[in-house]
Image (spheres, coloured by chain):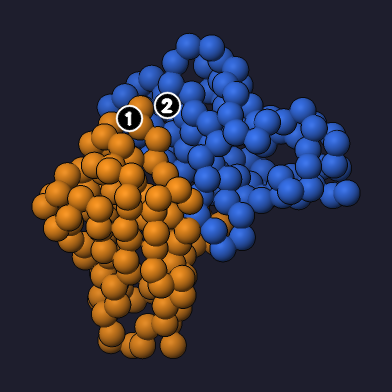
Amino acid sequence: AQSVAQPEDQVNVAEGNPLTVKCTYSVSGNPYLFWYVQYPNRGLQFLLKYITGDNLVKGSYGFEAEFNKSQTSFHLKKPSALVSDSALYFCAVRDENSGYALNFGKGTSLLVTP
Amino acid sequence: DGGITQSPKYLFRKEGQNVTLSCEQNLNHDAMYWYRQDPGQGLRLIYYSQIVNDFQKGDIAEGYSVSREKKESFPLTVTSAQKNPTAFYLCASSEGAGGPLETQYFGPGTRLLVL
């Protein structure tokens, strides 16, 4: 069975400060991890994914994520937050045995204040 | 939202009525998916299709039906058997046949409301 947890319902950050949105996962095989962002009443936009290789993955809009196998985590980060980064962020996971099934976390609402 | 379109943006359903949500993609993707999004629950998979004329149930298929007669189209029908249909419905597609490495790309969504 596979699952993903986003322990924070909301993260508040001041503009210009670094941000972190947390994600932990549980899979039976090798994990494939994804981050998506959703703006109000819009679909999900793909940010980045980890398949294999370098543990630090760089994605769209200056976001990056760090894969940590020992801690089973895949936290999303950005060095300097923008007000326009305020949105709902979803972590998702598959493993090599699950094929189509993309298991999403419940989402974390990020609020960046000026 | 790329080359995936969903219509309508808002849809109202009366009791006992079947309604159909449209999803079209011009990305030449093989696999297509339907998800339901409820507040605080993330996304849950309703149906997916890896190729034309083939589809499989996801985690919450009861009360829903789909068809895949064309590669670019994957309509979802919400039947009267779905007792709590109010939600945001998202269509997605991926390039191959839905393998574990593929990225899914999403449409803009349809919000379904019950009158």
How packed mark 1 is, by other alpha carbons closer than 10 Å (few <14, some 14-19, many 20 or more), is: many
> What residue is shown at x 11% (from left), y 52% (from top)?
B53
Residue sticking out furthest to the top: A53
Q: Colour of chain A?
A: blue
Residue B24 at x, y percent in the picture = 31, 58
Q: In the rendered view, tell whether residue A83 sits above or below residue A24.
A: below
Q: Is residue A70 left or right of residue B100?
A: right
Is the residue at mark 1 from the same chain as the one at mark 2? no
**Residue A92: % across, % down:** 47, 38
Disc 1, disc 2: CB below 8 Å? yes
Please give the name of the residue rendered at 25% of the width and 58% of the height, measured from the top-left corner: B74
Residue type at the position of mark 1 = Pro
Residue at numbered disc 2: A32
SS type, badge 2? strand
For the C terminus of chain B, the quadrant is bottom left
SS at mark 1 in the image? loop
Tell me residue B66's x, y (percent).
21, 62
Q: Amino acid at mark 2?
A: Tyr
Q: Which of the two residues, A78 or A103, is positioned nearer the viewer here?
A: A78
Q: Which residue is mark 1?
A: B100
